[in-house]
């Protein structure tokens, strides 16, 4: 145990004092120590143009696809705003074509997890001009994270697909073609900034106080201190910590056996956990856009302790 002198103290690691010395009685809150608060994310709208050909037929479609955050994922709405079917080389055919819409989220190598299908009327025009259509569908509560089917660890690789199928109209069998756009689907973590040797002032472990001026107090305890993560709803703790560190420390057992320096009336002697602060941003992918963007923070305990004497109202929690 390190003896306190002249209002100074040392950071203790496993009962051995380190060289970092700080003046007691003045509590400083490190910049960025307050947990990040996630703002309510807005809907993300992406315009897609898709086309395909089969023989002397060409189909084109303009789509609007929208991701609206909802629950632990989002609502995915896709609309075929307009279409154009062009015939070439004297190709014959009437105006009973189809422009059908399909979109889904799938696991890699497994197939659709959620999907939506919308069929047009059997009356699409094939005159080479653009025509309004407006067929639309929504998949509610699309998941952003899924566990693999055959494993208890990790998360499945997901992708999103928006597909338009053109069924052209001609005498005899009707040819068709499919125009597809795909996107990565799932969580992403970026902008990770890690700051070691931080004190978790906002979560003191223990404190004691003296009954009179010049008195001392003693703290003796064994506690478990846990790491913490502050991030938007719907993001799994294990996923976040795995992306922060391959060797994430979830908790540590710490023993405290320390006597305060002489205290004035009203002063308290605090014990705090120490560790590494992490700041980052989380998001998901949606056809080239980042959605569900939210800041996050974490505190990873390292098993060390920090001691400080605090005057009354030197720091008020929550202010």
Image (cartoon, grey):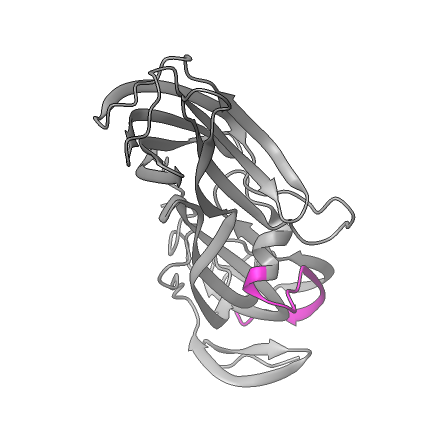
- Pick the quarter of the image with the N terminus: bottom right
Relative image position of residue 65 (x, y in whole percent): 36, 32
Residue at 54%, 40% (x, y): give it. Answer: 144
Residue at 25%, 20% (x, y): give it. Answer: 132
Q: Closer to the camera, 107 or 193?
A: 107
Relative image position of residue 114 (x, y in whole percent): 59, 31
User: Quick check: 55 above or below 136?
Assistant: below
Q: Closer to the camera, 187 or 216?
A: 187
The answer to which quarter of the image holds residue 39 is top left
Q: Closer to the camera, 77 or 197?
A: 77
Q: Which residue lies furthest to the bottom in this view?
A: 19
Relative image position of residue 125 (x, y in whole percent): 30, 18
Horizontally, residue 286 falls left or right of residue 223, namely: left
Q: Closer to the camera, 179 or 161?
A: 179
Relative image position of residue 279 (x, y in whole percent): 43, 60
The answer to which quarter of the image holds residue 226 is bottom right
Span of residues in magenta: 243-263
Instruction: Residue 6: tell me if it is visible.
Output: no
Instruction: Residue 164: tell me if it is visible.
Output: yes
Residue at 28%, 36% (x, y): give it. Answer: 89
Asked if the magenta segment contains residue 20, the reply would be no
User: Quick check: 292 above or below 189?
Assistant: above
């Amino acid at each position: 145990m390190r003896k306190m002198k002249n209002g100074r103290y040392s950071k203790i690691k496993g009962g051995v004092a380190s060289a970092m010395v700080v003046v007691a009685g003045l509590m400083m809150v490190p910049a960025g120590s307050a947990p990040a608060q996630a703002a309510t994310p807005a809907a993300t709208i992406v315009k897609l143009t898709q086309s395909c050909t089969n023989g002397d037929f060409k189909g084109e479609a303009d789509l609007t696809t929208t991701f609206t955050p909802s629950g632990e994922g989002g609502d995915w709405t896709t609309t075929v705003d307009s279409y154009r079917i062009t015939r070439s080389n004297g190709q014959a055919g009437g105006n009973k074509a189809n422009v059908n819409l399909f979109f889904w989220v799938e696991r890699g190598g497994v197939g659709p997890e959620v999907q939506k299908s919308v069929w047009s009327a059997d009356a699409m025009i094939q005159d080479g001009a653009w025509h309004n259509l407006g067929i639309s569908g929504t998949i509610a509560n699309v998941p952003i994270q899924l566990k693999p089917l055959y494993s208890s660890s990790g998360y499945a690789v997901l992708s999103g697909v928006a597909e338009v199928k053109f069924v052209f109209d001609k005498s005899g069998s009707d040819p068709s073609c499919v125009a597809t756009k795909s996107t990565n689907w799932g969580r992403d973590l970026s902008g990770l900034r890690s700051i070691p040797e931080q004190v978790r002032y906002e979560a003191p472990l223990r404190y004691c106080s003296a009954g009179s001026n010049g008195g001392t107090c003693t703290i003796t305890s064994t506690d478990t201190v846990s790491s913490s993560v502050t991030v938007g709803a719907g993001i799994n703790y294990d996923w976040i910590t795995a992306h922060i560190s391959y060797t994430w420390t979830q908790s540590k057992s710490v023993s405290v056996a320390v006597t305060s320096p002489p205290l004035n009336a009203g002063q308290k002697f605090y014990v705090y956990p120490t560790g590494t602060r992490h700041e980052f941003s989380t998001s998901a992918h949606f056809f080239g856009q980042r959605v569900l963007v939210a800041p996050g923070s974490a505190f990873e305990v390292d098993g060390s302790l920090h001691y400080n004497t605090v005057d009354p109202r030197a720091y008020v929690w929550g202010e």
